[in-house]
Amino acid sequence: MKQDEKKKPKDRRPYLASECRDLAEADKWRQQIMREIGRKVAEIQNEGLGEHRLRDLNDEINKLIREKTHWERRIIELGGPNYTKQSAKMTDLEGNIVDVPNPSGRGPGYRYFGAAKKLPGVRELFEKPPELRKRRTRYDIYKRIGASYYGYRDDEDGVLVKLEGPAEAAMREMAVEEWNMMEEIKREAKKAVKSGEVANVKEILFEEEEEVVEEERREKERQEEEDVLRKKEFVVHVPLPDEKEIERMVVEKKKMELLSKYTSENLIEEQTEAKAMLNINR
């Protein structure tokens, strides 16, 4: 009892932080508040306390946090360190950091701790609403379309150059072969005209004429089928030419056209040579 009488009475924490004039005293009161917050946070982890007790503990912890903020602001005014930068962040049930609702804009805002996060009406605050997928409008669709969509930049990636190189070489080779074939056919036709002999049909006809003959043959076959369907009761009394006869007739016609063409060219050349000779003699 004598020792208790000698002890000084315990100092009470000032009601307002602005009443404190000493930096060490302000830091001491802040540490005291931190210890009280730690005890209450450990107590609120127990889910068996009941809804009312959990809500009361959560309110007390938020009140102590606001008071701690006042003391930290007072410590800064007295020239002490800034403890607000080291304040802990609020997390949800999964441990993710969430924003603390603070409509007033002053202080740290109201927080939930421990089992208070699982109270009815509080759990919904931490659940993120499902994101509604907004339907894109026609304007948004066309806004993303550029020149590459229409194929104007296909030449810039270098893929077409690699593919077109071999194709261009093959087409050039085919064109040269076709030109050589045409020149050979012209020379043989000229020789046949000068010697008075008829050139072989297979050597005169070239690939394009064969395609024309094939196309004409198919067209005639189609017309014949249509005529047969249109006039089934018609009886043919005259023998009709078969496919080989038609091809032979078409080939003969083409041959005569080529011969007449090259003959006219030779006549023109001879006339020009004769005129040139006459002009020289004069």
Image (spheres, helix red, strand yellow):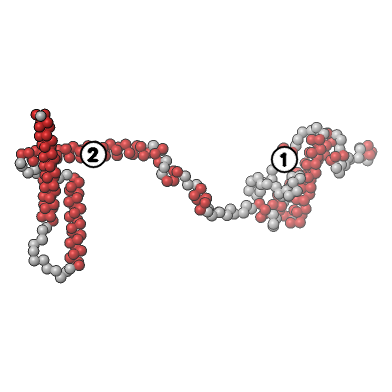
Q: Is residue 54 left or right of residue 167?
A: right
Q: Quadrant of the N terminus?
A: top right
- Taking the spot 73% from the left edge, 48% from the top edge, the residue there is 102
Residue that numbered label 1 is attached to: 87
Q: Quadrant of residue 231?
A: bottom left
Q: Amino acid at mark 1?
A: Ser
Query: Residue 227, image x and y in percent?
Result: 18, 64
Residue at the limit of the structure toward the left, as seen here: 196
- Taking the spot 79% from the left edge, 47% from the top edge, the residue there is 63
In front here: 22 or 136?
136
Could you give the CA–CA distance between mark 1 and mark 2, rounded to whole angstroms?
Answer: 81 Å
Residue that numbered label 2 is attached to: 175
Q: Is residue 54 left or right of residue 262?
A: right
Residue at the limit of the structure toward the front, as seen here: 282
Q: Quadrant of residue 185?
A: top left
- For residue 137, say whether it is visible: yes
**Which of the two discs, 1 and 2, sits closer to the camera?**
2
